[in-house]
Amino acid sequence: KFLTGDVINTEAFAEFIKETNIAVMTELGGHNFRFASRRGKPLAIGVYNPNEEIKTSKFRKEMKQYAVSGQYKEDYVWGTMDGIKWEKFISQFGITKAGLPEVVILDAPERTYWQDSSVLSVAEFMNAVKDGEIESRLQEKGPKNPLEEFSQLFITYMPWSLFALLTLFVVVFWLALPSTDPIRPVAPSREEEESKKDK
C-alpha cells in the first residue's frame, strides 16, 4: 500500500504507518494479538511446538514462504504462535499440542475459524479453505471464571489496563492516608454569639 497525494497530511501519514506497520509474519502473543486480528483480514496462524526445533523450523519457513509468495498471501494477516505457551487459547479451535505444527485461520471479529488437522501442507490448507473443502466453524466460547476473564481483558488492553490499575491504586492509597491538617475549632456562628450576649 502506498501513500499518494502531493501534500502529506500528518493524520493521514500516521494512519498509513499504523495500517502498514506489521511484519510479513508476526509472532503473536498477548501484546499484539488484538491489533493483528483487527486489521480487516482474517489471521492465518501457524501454531508450533517450540520444543520440536527441527519440525518447527521447517514449518515456520514454509509459512513465511507462503506469506511472501503464496497464491492467497494478500487475503490474510500472517502470524505464528507458540502452541505450548498458548495451549489453552488454541484448544478452542480443536488444536492439541500433540498435533502441532498446524495452521488455523481466524476471523476474530466474526468469531469464525477454519481448521483441519489432516491437512499438513500450508499451501494445501489454504487451497482447501478457498475451495470450501474446509468449512468455517464458530469459535467455541469455553466457560471462564471471573479471574480468568479479568486476566484476559487485562492482557488484551495493555498498557492502558496497567495504567488504570495503577491510578486506582494511587487513589485508594491517597484516600486511606490520615489527614495531616490539625483539627481546627469551629468558630461560633453569629446567632450563637448574640445569644451569649443576651444571657
Image (cartoon, rainbow, N blue to C red):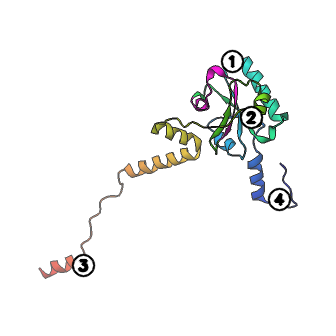
Place of residue 171 in the rendered image (x, y in percent of width and height, measured from the top left) = 45, 51
Q: Residue at x 77, y 57 (%)?
A: 12
Residue that label 2 marks: 129
Magenta region: 88-107
- State the residue lying farthest toward the right: 6
Q: Look at label 3 and name its amino acid.
A: Arg
**Mark 4 lies on residue:** 8
Residue 113 percent coordinates (x, y): 66, 37
Residue at image x 63%, y 19%?
Answer: 98
Amino acid type shown at disc 4 = Ile
Q: Secondary structure at mark 1?
A: loop
Of all residues, the one furthest to the bottom in this rendering is 198
Q: Residue at x 74, y 53 (%)?
A: 15
x, y (%) of residue 33?
A: 65, 39
Near-viewer residue (9 or 169): 9
| Mark 4 vs mark 2, CA separation in Å | 40 Å
Query: In 3D space, how far apart are the residues under numbered discs 1 and 2 (Cα atoms)?
Result: 27 Å
**SS state under label 2:** helix
Looking at the image, is mark 3 or mark 2 earlier in the sequence? 2
Q: Which residue is mark 1?
A: 52
Relative vertical location of residue 52 with respect to residue 91 in this rendering, above or below: above
Q: Nearer the viewer, mark 4 or mark 1?
A: 1
The magenta stretch spans residue 114 = no
